[in-house]
Amino acid sequence: MSTSTTPICRPFSPRSNGRHMPIATTFTCYLQYKLQQPARASTTTQRPAKTDEMTISITGATGFIGRKLVQRLVADNHKIRVLTRSMSKAKRIFPANDYPGIIIVEEPEWTKYIQGSTAVVNLAGTPISTRWSPEIKTDIKNSRVSVTSKVVEAINAATIENRPSVFVSATAIGYYGTSEGETFDETSSSGNDYLSEVCREWEANAQKVDDTVRLVLLRIGIVLDKDGGALAKMIPLFMLFAGGPIGSGKQWFSWIHRDDLVSLILEALSNPAYKGVINGTAPNPVRLAEMCDRLGSVMGRPSWLPVPEFAVKAIFGEGASVVLDGQKVFPKRAQELGFKYKYPHVSDAIRAIISS
Protein backbone atom coordinates (compact mmCIF):
# COMPACT_ATOMS: atom_id res chain seq x y z
CA MET A 1 0.00 0.00 0.00
CA SER A 2 1.53 3.24 -1.10
CA THR A 3 1.24 6.37 0.90
CA SER A 4 1.40 9.80 -0.68
CA THR A 5 2.45 12.77 1.32
CA THR A 6 0.81 16.06 0.55
CA PRO A 7 3.24 18.95 0.89
CA ILE A 8 2.22 21.37 3.53
CA CYS A 9 3.55 24.31 1.56
CA ARG A 10 2.21 25.96 -1.52
CA PRO A 11 4.86 27.73 -3.66
CA PHE A 12 6.34 30.28 -1.31
CA SER A 13 8.01 33.57 -2.02
CA PRO A 14 9.11 36.31 0.30
CA ARG A 15 6.49 38.60 -1.26
CA SER A 16 3.60 36.41 -0.14
CA ASN A 17 4.54 36.93 3.52
CA GLY A 18 2.84 33.58 4.24
CA ARG A 19 -0.68 35.08 4.18
CA HIS A 20 -3.51 32.66 5.02
CA MET A 21 -1.08 30.18 6.66
CA PRO A 22 -0.63 29.29 10.32
CA ILE A 23 2.53 30.81 11.79
CA ALA A 24 4.29 27.44 12.26
CA THR A 25 3.52 26.43 8.69
CA THR A 26 4.75 29.77 7.38
CA PHE A 27 8.08 29.39 9.18
CA THR A 28 8.51 25.80 7.92
CA CYS A 29 7.79 26.83 4.36
CA TYR A 30 10.18 29.76 4.58
CA LEU A 31 13.01 27.42 5.66
CA GLN A 32 12.14 25.05 2.84
CA TYR A 33 12.22 27.93 0.38
CA LYS A 34 15.66 29.10 1.58
CA LEU A 35 17.14 25.62 1.36
CA GLN A 36 15.95 25.28 -2.23
CA GLN A 37 17.62 28.49 -3.40
CA PRO A 38 21.00 28.27 -5.18
CA ALA A 39 23.97 29.34 -3.10
CA ARG A 40 24.81 33.00 -3.57
CA ALA A 41 28.33 34.24 -3.84
CA SER A 42 29.49 36.10 -0.78
CA THR A 43 29.56 39.83 -1.24
CA THR A 44 32.17 40.17 1.50
CA THR A 45 35.58 41.09 0.11
CA GLN A 46 38.09 38.46 1.13
CA ARG A 47 41.48 39.74 2.19
CA PRO A 48 43.93 38.34 -0.36
CA ALA A 49 46.89 36.28 0.70
CA LYS A 50 50.00 38.36 1.26
CA THR A 51 51.54 36.94 -1.91
CA ASP A 52 49.98 34.34 -4.19
CA GLU A 53 52.05 31.21 -4.51
CA MET A 54 54.63 31.56 -7.27
CA THR A 55 57.12 29.31 -9.00
CA ILE A 56 60.37 31.28 -9.10
CA SER A 57 63.59 30.42 -10.93
CA ILE A 58 66.68 32.05 -9.41
CA THR A 59 70.23 32.44 -10.69
CA GLY A 60 72.85 33.33 -8.09
CA ALA A 61 70.75 31.61 -5.43
CA THR A 62 73.85 30.27 -3.66
CA GLY A 63 75.29 33.77 -3.19
CA PHE A 64 75.11 36.20 -0.29
CA ILE A 65 71.81 37.74 -1.40
CA GLY A 66 70.36 34.65 -3.03
CA ARG A 67 70.60 32.45 0.07
CA LYS A 68 68.52 34.87 2.13
CA LEU A 69 66.03 35.36 -0.69
CA VAL A 70 65.47 31.61 -1.01
CA GLN A 71 64.92 31.31 2.75
CA ARG A 72 62.25 34.03 2.66
CA LEU A 73 60.52 32.61 -0.40
CA VAL A 74 60.44 29.10 1.04
CA ALA A 75 59.00 30.47 4.29
CA ASP A 76 56.24 32.09 2.21
CA ASN A 77 55.48 28.71 0.54
CA HIS A 78 56.70 29.58 -2.94
CA LYS A 79 58.14 26.93 -5.25
CA ILE A 80 61.84 27.51 -5.96
CA ARG A 81 64.01 26.43 -8.87
CA VAL A 82 67.70 27.06 -8.20
CA LEU A 83 69.56 27.63 -11.48
CA THR A 84 73.21 26.88 -10.78
CA ARG A 85 76.53 26.19 -12.45
CA SER A 86 77.59 23.94 -9.55
CA MET A 87 75.17 21.23 -8.48
CA SER A 88 77.42 20.17 -5.59
CA LYS A 89 77.61 23.70 -4.16
CA ALA A 90 73.87 24.23 -4.45
CA LYS A 91 73.10 20.91 -2.74
CA ARG A 92 75.48 21.81 0.07
CA ILE A 93 73.82 25.18 0.63
CA PHE A 94 70.27 23.88 0.17
CA PRO A 95 70.27 20.34 1.64
CA ALA A 96 67.19 18.32 0.74
CA ASN A 97 66.27 17.73 4.39
CA ASP A 98 66.02 21.47 5.04
CA TYR A 99 64.68 22.48 1.62
CA PRO A 100 62.59 19.50 0.47
CA GLY A 101 60.62 21.35 -2.20
CA ILE A 102 63.51 23.04 -4.01
CA ILE A 103 64.49 21.89 -7.49
CA ILE A 104 68.20 22.37 -8.29
CA VAL A 105 69.06 22.60 -11.97
CA GLU A 106 72.45 22.84 -13.70
CA GLU A 107 72.99 25.18 -16.62
CA PRO A 108 72.15 22.95 -19.61
CA GLU A 109 68.66 22.43 -18.16
CA TRP A 110 67.94 26.05 -17.26
CA THR A 111 65.66 26.73 -20.23
CA LYS A 112 63.34 23.84 -19.41
CA TYR A 113 62.77 25.12 -15.87
CA ILE A 114 62.65 28.84 -16.64
CA GLN A 115 59.77 28.13 -18.98
CA GLY A 116 56.73 27.50 -16.84
CA SER A 117 58.00 29.64 -13.97
CA THR A 118 55.90 32.52 -12.70
CA ALA A 119 58.96 34.74 -12.28
CA VAL A 120 62.73 34.77 -12.70
CA VAL A 121 65.24 36.48 -10.40
CA ASN A 122 68.71 36.97 -11.84
CA LEU A 123 71.41 37.50 -9.18
CA ALA A 124 74.35 35.81 -10.90
CA GLY A 125 77.78 37.43 -10.77
CA THR A 126 81.35 36.76 -9.67
CA PRO A 127 82.38 38.86 -6.62
CA ILE A 128 84.21 42.05 -7.58
CA SER A 129 86.10 42.73 -4.34
CA THR A 130 89.30 41.06 -5.47
CA ARG A 131 92.42 41.86 -7.49
CA TRP A 132 91.39 42.45 -11.08
CA SER A 133 93.60 40.38 -13.33
CA PRO A 134 92.60 40.31 -17.02
CA GLU A 135 91.05 36.89 -16.42
CA ILE A 136 89.07 38.11 -13.40
CA LYS A 137 87.79 41.14 -15.32
CA THR A 138 86.58 38.85 -18.08
CA ASP A 139 84.81 36.65 -15.54
CA ILE A 140 83.27 39.65 -13.77
CA LYS A 141 81.67 40.69 -17.05
CA ASN A 142 80.76 37.26 -18.45
CA SER A 143 79.24 36.00 -15.21
CA ARG A 144 76.77 38.87 -15.43
CA VAL A 145 76.32 39.70 -19.10
CA SER A 146 76.43 36.16 -20.55
CA VAL A 147 74.25 34.62 -17.86
CA THR A 148 71.68 37.39 -18.28
CA SER A 149 71.63 36.76 -22.04
CA LYS A 150 70.99 33.04 -21.49
CA VAL A 151 68.16 33.75 -19.08
CA VAL A 152 66.53 36.27 -21.44
CA GLU A 153 66.82 33.87 -24.38
CA ALA A 154 65.10 31.16 -22.35
CA ILE A 155 62.29 33.52 -21.31
CA ASN A 156 61.76 34.79 -24.85
CA ALA A 157 61.75 31.26 -26.31
CA ALA A 158 58.80 30.24 -24.13
CA THR A 159 55.27 30.22 -25.43
CA ILE A 160 53.09 32.97 -24.03
CA GLU A 161 51.36 30.42 -21.75
CA ASN A 162 54.69 29.23 -20.29
CA ARG A 163 56.52 32.55 -20.22
CA PRO A 164 57.37 34.07 -16.82
CA SER A 165 55.43 37.26 -16.22
CA VAL A 166 58.14 38.99 -14.15
CA PHE A 167 61.91 39.26 -14.58
CA VAL A 168 63.84 40.85 -11.70
CA SER A 169 67.44 41.30 -12.77
CA ALA A 170 70.21 42.58 -10.54
CA THR A 171 72.61 45.25 -11.65
CA ALA A 172 74.69 47.60 -9.49
CA ILE A 173 75.12 51.23 -8.48
CA GLY A 174 78.49 50.95 -10.20
CA TYR A 175 76.42 51.99 -13.23
CA TYR A 176 76.74 55.63 -12.11
CA GLY A 177 80.51 55.72 -11.76
CA THR A 178 82.08 57.40 -8.74
CA SER A 179 81.99 60.95 -7.41
CA GLU A 180 82.87 62.85 -4.24
CA GLY A 181 80.25 65.58 -4.67
CA GLU A 182 77.59 64.42 -7.12
CA THR A 183 74.40 62.63 -6.07
CA PHE A 184 72.71 59.94 -8.13
CA ASP A 185 69.22 58.53 -8.56
CA GLU A 186 67.57 56.35 -11.20
CA THR A 187 67.48 59.23 -13.70
CA SER A 188 71.25 59.86 -13.54
CA SER A 189 73.46 59.00 -16.49
CA SER A 190 76.06 56.25 -16.52
CA GLY A 191 79.72 56.70 -15.63
CA ASN A 192 82.71 55.96 -17.83
CA ASP A 193 84.79 53.46 -15.83
CA TYR A 194 85.05 49.67 -16.10
CA LEU A 195 82.17 48.85 -13.71
CA SER A 196 79.92 51.36 -15.46
CA GLU A 197 80.63 49.60 -18.73
CA VAL A 198 79.83 46.21 -17.21
CA CYS A 199 76.55 47.51 -15.77
CA ARG A 200 75.49 49.07 -19.07
CA GLU A 201 76.00 45.78 -20.93
CA TRP A 202 74.38 43.86 -18.08
CA GLU A 203 71.25 46.02 -18.21
CA ALA A 204 71.16 46.13 -22.01
CA ASN A 205 70.96 42.35 -22.15
CA ALA A 206 68.18 42.25 -19.55
CA GLN A 207 66.23 44.83 -21.55
CA LYS A 208 66.05 42.41 -24.48
CA VAL A 209 63.40 40.43 -22.61
CA ASP A 210 60.02 40.21 -24.35
CA ASP A 211 57.68 43.18 -23.87
CA THR A 212 55.05 40.91 -22.31
CA VAL A 213 57.36 40.40 -19.31
CA ARG A 214 57.49 43.01 -16.53
CA LEU A 215 61.17 43.90 -16.13
CA VAL A 216 62.66 45.25 -12.90
CA LEU A 217 66.33 46.30 -12.90
CA LEU A 218 67.66 46.53 -9.33
CA ARG A 219 70.81 48.63 -9.07
CA ILE A 220 72.14 47.22 -5.83
CA GLY A 221 74.40 49.07 -3.42
CA ILE A 222 76.71 47.70 -0.69
CA VAL A 223 74.73 44.97 1.07
CA LEU A 224 75.19 44.66 4.83
CA ASP A 225 74.94 41.53 6.97
CA LYS A 226 77.42 39.61 9.08
CA ASP A 227 77.85 36.46 6.98
CA GLY A 228 78.97 38.08 3.74
CA GLY A 229 79.73 41.29 1.90
CA ALA A 230 81.70 44.22 3.30
CA LEU A 231 80.77 43.73 6.97
CA ALA A 232 81.99 40.14 7.04
CA LYS A 233 85.48 41.49 6.25
CA MET A 234 85.29 44.45 8.63
CA ILE A 235 83.88 42.84 11.78
CA PRO A 236 86.92 40.59 12.50
CA LEU A 237 89.26 43.59 12.27
CA PHE A 238 87.17 45.58 14.73
CA MET A 239 87.03 42.59 17.07
CA LEU A 240 90.85 42.71 17.14
CA PHE A 241 90.88 46.48 17.82
CA ALA A 242 92.31 46.97 14.32
CA GLY A 243 89.31 48.57 12.62
CA GLY A 244 89.16 51.82 10.73
CA PRO A 245 88.18 53.38 7.42
CA ILE A 246 89.76 52.43 4.12
CA GLY A 247 91.68 55.20 2.40
CA SER A 248 90.51 58.72 3.23
CA GLY A 249 87.18 57.60 4.69
CA LYS A 250 85.53 60.47 2.83
CA GLN A 251 84.16 58.26 0.06
CA TRP A 252 80.39 57.80 0.02
CA PHE A 253 79.00 54.49 1.21
CA SER A 254 75.61 53.71 -0.36
CA TRP A 255 74.45 50.70 1.58
CA ILE A 256 71.37 48.55 2.27
CA HIS A 257 70.62 45.92 4.91
CA ARG A 258 70.26 42.49 3.31
CA ASP A 259 66.79 42.03 4.83
CA ASP A 260 65.59 45.25 3.20
CA LEU A 261 67.04 44.24 -0.15
CA VAL A 262 65.30 40.87 -0.01
CA SER A 263 62.04 42.63 0.91
CA LEU A 264 62.54 44.95 -2.08
CA ILE A 265 62.96 41.93 -4.37
CA LEU A 266 59.79 40.37 -2.94
CA GLU A 267 57.89 43.59 -3.63
CA ALA A 268 59.28 43.68 -7.16
CA LEU A 269 58.03 40.13 -7.72
CA SER A 270 54.51 40.72 -6.47
CA ASN A 271 53.72 44.39 -7.09
CA PRO A 272 52.96 45.34 -10.72
CA ALA A 273 53.85 48.97 -10.00
CA TYR A 274 57.50 47.95 -9.73
CA LYS A 275 59.06 48.20 -13.18
CA GLY A 276 62.15 49.63 -14.81
CA VAL A 277 65.20 50.77 -12.84
CA ILE A 278 65.02 50.82 -9.03
CA ASN A 279 68.02 51.59 -6.81
CA GLY A 280 68.55 48.93 -4.15
CA THR A 281 70.01 51.22 -1.50
CA ALA A 282 68.91 52.67 1.83
CA PRO A 283 67.64 56.28 1.84
CA ASN A 284 70.51 57.57 4.00
CA PRO A 285 73.98 57.01 2.50
CA VAL A 286 76.94 57.87 4.73
CA ARG A 287 80.64 58.47 4.30
CA LEU A 288 82.78 55.43 5.01
CA ALA A 289 84.37 57.04 8.08
CA GLU A 290 80.92 57.47 9.63
CA MET A 291 80.04 53.90 8.79
CA CYS A 292 83.20 52.69 10.58
CA ASP A 293 82.51 54.95 13.58
CA ARG A 294 79.01 53.46 13.90
CA LEU A 295 80.37 49.92 13.62
CA GLY A 296 83.03 50.57 16.25
CA SER A 297 80.52 52.20 18.58
CA VAL A 298 78.08 49.27 18.40
CA MET A 299 80.89 46.76 18.90
CA GLY A 300 82.54 48.73 21.70
CA ARG A 301 85.72 49.11 19.65
CA PRO A 302 87.54 52.19 18.35
CA SER A 303 87.63 53.04 14.67
CA TRP A 304 91.17 54.32 14.75
CA LEU A 305 93.36 52.37 12.33
CA PRO A 306 92.76 53.47 8.75
CA VAL A 307 93.99 51.29 5.91
CA PRO A 308 96.19 53.52 3.72
CA GLU A 309 95.26 53.93 0.08
CA PHE A 310 98.62 52.66 -1.22
CA ALA A 311 98.17 49.39 0.71
CA VAL A 312 94.72 48.82 -0.79
CA LYS A 313 96.05 49.47 -4.29
CA ALA A 314 98.95 47.10 -3.68
CA ILE A 315 96.52 44.33 -2.74
CA PHE A 316 93.68 44.93 -5.18
CA GLY A 317 95.28 46.79 -8.08
CA GLU A 318 92.61 48.26 -10.35
CA GLY A 319 89.99 46.57 -8.18
CA ALA A 320 90.85 48.99 -5.36
CA SER A 321 88.42 51.46 -6.91
CA VAL A 322 85.56 49.39 -5.46
CA VAL A 323 86.53 50.41 -1.91
CA LEU A 324 88.49 53.64 -2.42
CA ASP A 325 85.92 55.42 -4.59
CA GLY A 326 82.26 55.80 -3.76
CA GLN A 327 79.00 57.28 -4.92
CA LYS A 328 76.10 58.94 -3.12
CA VAL A 329 73.01 57.11 -4.38
CA PHE A 330 69.39 57.68 -3.39
CA PRO A 331 66.51 55.19 -3.89
CA LYS A 332 64.10 57.70 -5.39
CA ARG A 333 61.87 55.13 -7.13
CA ALA A 334 61.54 52.83 -4.12
CA GLN A 335 60.46 55.77 -1.98
CA GLU A 336 57.99 56.97 -4.63
CA LEU A 337 56.52 53.46 -4.66
CA GLY A 338 56.08 53.60 -0.89
CA PHE A 339 58.60 50.92 0.02
CA LYS A 340 59.03 50.75 3.80
CA TYR A 341 62.61 50.31 4.98
CA LYS A 342 63.10 48.35 8.17
CA TYR A 343 66.59 49.85 8.47
CA PRO A 344 66.70 53.35 6.93
CA HIS A 345 69.71 54.42 9.05
CA VAL A 346 73.07 52.67 9.14
CA SER A 347 73.31 52.75 12.94
CA ASP A 348 70.04 50.78 13.22
CA ALA A 349 71.20 48.32 10.59
CA ILE A 350 74.56 47.70 12.27
CA ARG A 351 72.98 47.37 15.70
CA ALA A 352 70.56 44.73 14.40
CA ILE A 353 73.31 42.84 12.57
CA ILE A 354 75.76 42.74 15.47
CA SER A 355 73.07 41.71 17.96
CA SER A 356 71.70 38.92 15.77
Image (cartoon, rainbow, N blue to C red):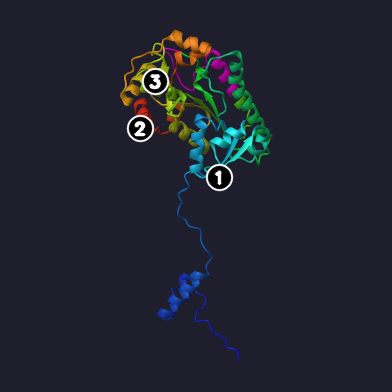
Given the image, on which type of amino acid does mark 3 rest?
Leu
Q: Quadrant of residue 160?
A: top right
Q: Which mark is residue 355?
A: 2
Q: CA–CA distance between discs 2 and 3?
A: 17 Å
Local crowd at mark 1 within 10 Å, few (<14), some, or many (≥20)? few
Which residue is identified by label 1? 100
Which-is-in-front pick, marks 3 and 1? 3
Given the image, on which type of amino acid does mark 2 rest?
Ser
Q: Which residues are magenta?
A: 179-203
Local crowd at mark 3 within 10 Å, few (<14), some, or many (≥20)? some
Q: Position of residue 20 (x, y in %)?
A: 44, 80
Local crowd at mark 2 within 10 Å, few (<14), some, or many (≥20)? few
Q: CA–CA distance between discs 3 and 1?
A: 38 Å
Q: Position of residue 312 (x, y in %)?
A: 46, 12
Q: Earlier in the sequence, mark 2 or mark 3?
A: 3
**Considering only vertical position in the picture, is 185 above or below 3?**
above
Q: Relative to the observer, which residue lies in front, 188 or 249?
A: 249
